[in-house]
Amino acid sequence: QVQLEESGGGLVQPGGSLRLSCAASGSISSIYATGWYRQAPGKQRELVATCTSDGTTNYADSVQGRFTISRDATKNTVYLQMNSLKPEDTAVYYCNSNTFYGGSYWGQGTQVTVSS
């Protein structure tokens, strides 16, 4: 079992920055990939960025060059640094981890609102 807790969401003006954190606990060693997803009102949940245990990263085209996913293994935490935020980035952001044993775990989500 893996437990995930997101933090760092909030209200920010267009062009601003936020850093989201996803702290993992439980069977940490079983995780092979962690990703950030988001879901805006009335829309499907979409992939934002992923990071595998070997450091390989992947980004949605819409955030490429603005968002950076990183991991601190010493803190069992994955971060999403979001720069140059736009109103269309407004969504609930979720952390997801997949394990070598086929498990998939989600956090409770954190709201990000980009508005002037």
Image: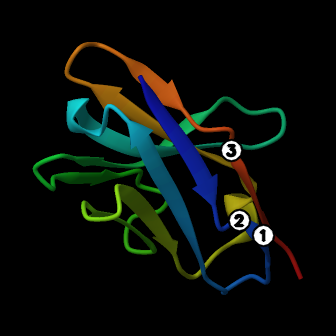
Q: Amino acid at mark 1?
A: Gly
Dot 2 and dot 1 residues touching (CB under 8 Å): yes
Report, in whole angstroms, how far the alpha carbon at label 3 lies from the one at label 2. 9 Å
- Indicate left or right for 65 with 106 as reference: left
Against 28, is 79 above or below?
below
Report, in whole angstroms, how far the alpha carbon at label 2 lies from the one at label 1. 4 Å
Q: Secondary structure at mark 2?
A: loop
Task: Between residue 65 and residue 22, name the one nearer to us.
Answer: 22
Most extreme residue toward the left is: 54
Dot 3 and dot 2 residues touching (CB under 8 Å): no
Q: Amino acid at mark 2?
A: Gly
Most extreme residue toward the top is: 102
Residue that mark 1 sits on: 10
Task: Between residue 71 and residue 65, name the one nearer to us.
Answer: 71
Residue that mark 2 sits on: 9
Indicate which disc, 3 or 2, sits on the residue closer to the N terminus. Answer: 2
Q: Residue at x 23, y 30 (%)?
A: 30
Residue 97 at x, y = what percent?
39, 35
Q: Residue at x 74, y 33 (%)?
A: 43
Indicate which disc, 1 or 3, sits on the residue closer to the N terminus. Answer: 1
Against 59, is 19 above or below?
below
Residue 14 at x, y = what percent?
74, 82
Residue 62 at x, y = what percent?
49, 57
Residue that mark 3 sits on: 109
Q: Secondary structure at mark 3?
A: loop
Q: Amino acid at mark 3?
A: Gly
Most extreme residue toward the right is: 116
Would you identify the image quadrant in which residue 33 lies? Answer: top left
- Indicate left or right for 7 with 50 as reference: right
